[in-house]
Amino acid sequence: MPAKAEAGKAAKKARPVKAKRAAAPSVAPLPVPSGPPLQLLSVASEVFPLVKTGGLADVVGALPAALAEEGVQALTFVPGYPAVMEALEDGETVADLDPILGGEARVLRGRAAGLDLAVLDAPSLFARPGGPYSMPGGGEWSDNGVRFGTLCRAAALVARGAIDGYRPDVVHCHDWQAGLTPAYLHFSPDPAPPSVATIHNIAFQGQMPPDILGELGLPPEAYSIEGVEYYGSVGYLKSAVRLADRVTTVSPTYAREIRSSEFGMGLEGLIAARGADVSGILNGIDLSVWNPETDPSLAARFSRTTLGRRSANKPALLSRLGLDPDSNRPLFGVVSRLTWQKGIDLLVEALGTLLGQDADLVVLGSGEPALESALSAAASRHPDRIGVQLGYDEALAHLIQAGADALLIPSRFEPCGLTQLCALRYGAIPVAARVGGLSDTIVDTNEMARRAGVGTGVLFSPVGREPFEQALVRTCELYRSPATWRRMQTNALRTDVGWAGPARTYADLFRQLATPAVTQA
């Protein structure tokens, strides 16, 4: 089943969890070693700024620099898409995989965008137009199972020494596209390093027909419930959850949520069975990329101590989207995939309430055609109040974060979310569903928080039209209290949304796996 269709089918089962939640497993900190850095092989299907379809690329691109501060040297293993091959500097062939993979395939090593990369140069699989998963005209490549299975197989070869002089201490696999890597390590007779699998969104699982097993080069015994078999298919993410030494998700709350049928998307039983082997580590954002003091995309740069300068970005944003630049109305922004998971249908239903609160709206994103059409039609009906740009524009995304008064994130489930972290960094007040990483990163400005002066946003639950509309009304009320609003913005700008803390937690985990004897001592 294609990943997008699979996610849409699974996501429709999700509902907010109200059950009591267990404490998230913790990782005991280890001292940063003074000797050689721990060697990490990071395996992913995309990496910012070279190839990006979502937050996965941002994480894969930003984490290595933060890990370096913790004594971890990451080598990022990615497919040789045209954009990657073009950006690779001084690429050198370090492994010839032709005889093993049965076709032209080699590993190049070099640097691009400040990253140490190992690139799987397999032209028949990755030298294609379009996106990393989809054809230029739309629709996913029919051989995605083989493409990313080959990526995993090659990654396992690198992990076991295919590159002369390189042997990682730990392998870090991201999402279903890298999910078979632990299987190749597990079912090989050769010694293999431990592995960590990170689930960025459990709705995308990579389920492929069973006859793909022969093409993947996995042994027959791998196709079992203790291996890659998943309800009669080959489950890429399932095998990672089952066979990786540790499993992480991208927020503590999401790590608890996916143990339930409401959010586990069929994997909740296996997640629960792994127990303390599953933990949540919050994402961060690259503070050098998302920095309102230096951002070239802004009309006016600012900081917490020069917050007044932020106001110049609002008229610039309104003009960019064809709205009245002199408007004094509260301006809501959306930077998102326009999908059911992201709650964009709730936004469409709540437009009457938003406009009735004398507020404006700007939207940047793409996704489900019906939602794109509904938002575009609303912009046509209210050209002076609603601005919509379909697609993605990195510079405009930055300007929305700096120019909107508040950012809307009515997601039905949200593993972590990066857009609210960017909003906090830029002083746009996040208005979000109380789910996943949104609840971990936003302090609701309720009456108690307001009196204590600690609120950074507006949270609502359960996820539905009426609670969302109530949140819109409450946000507009807060906006009309300038002192309260400025305090919220100041609190938001003080929030630590960088990678330093999460990288320390990842590094502790990697060191525990690489040095189990030291950990147990």
Image: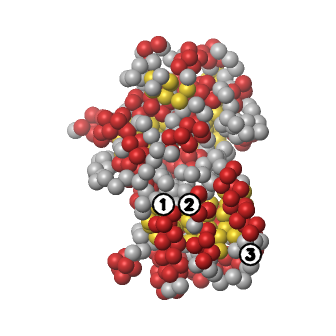
Apparent side of residue 370 relative to residue 507 in the rendered image (left or right): right
Quarter holding residue 147 = top right
Please report contact status of discs 3 and 2: CB closer than 8 Å, yes or no.
no
Mark 1 or mark 3, which has the lower sequence index? 3
Q: Amino acid at mark 3?
A: Asp
What residue appears at the point 51 percent right and 76 percent down from the top-left corner? 473
The reply to whether residue 309 is visible in this rendering is no
The C terminus sits in image quarter: top left
Residue neighbourhood size for the residue with mark 2, other residues' Cα within 10 Å, grouped as few (<14), some (14–19), many (≥20): some
Residue neighbourhood size for the residue with mark 1, other residues' Cα within 10 Å, grouped as few (<14), some (14–19), many (≥20): some
Name the one closer to the observer, 382 or 206.
382
Of circles 3 and 2, which is in front? 2
Mark 2 or mark 1, which has the lower sequence index? 2
Name the one closer to the observer, 394 or 438.
438
The x, y position of residue 288, in whole percent, is 59, 60
Please report contact status of discs 2 and 1: CB closer than 8 Å, yes or no.
yes
Q: What element does badge 2 sit on?
A: helix
Q: Which mark is residue 346?
A: 2
Q: What element does badge 3 sit on?
A: loop
Q: Which residue is mark 3?
A: 384
Q: Which mark is residue 464?
A: 1
Q: Which mark is residue 295?
A: none
The x, y position of residue 16, in whole percent, is 41, 54
Rendered position, 232 above or below 330: above
Q: Amino acid at mark 1?
A: Gly
Give the Cα distance between marks 2 and 1.
Answer: 7 Å
Give the Cα distance between marks 3 and 2.
Answer: 22 Å
Of circles 1 and 3, which is in front? 1
What residue appears at the point 64 percent right and 46 percent down from the top-left corner? 53
The x, y position of residue 298, in whole percent, is 68, 70
Q: Residue furthest left?
A: 521
Mark 3 or mark 2, which has the lower sequence index? 2
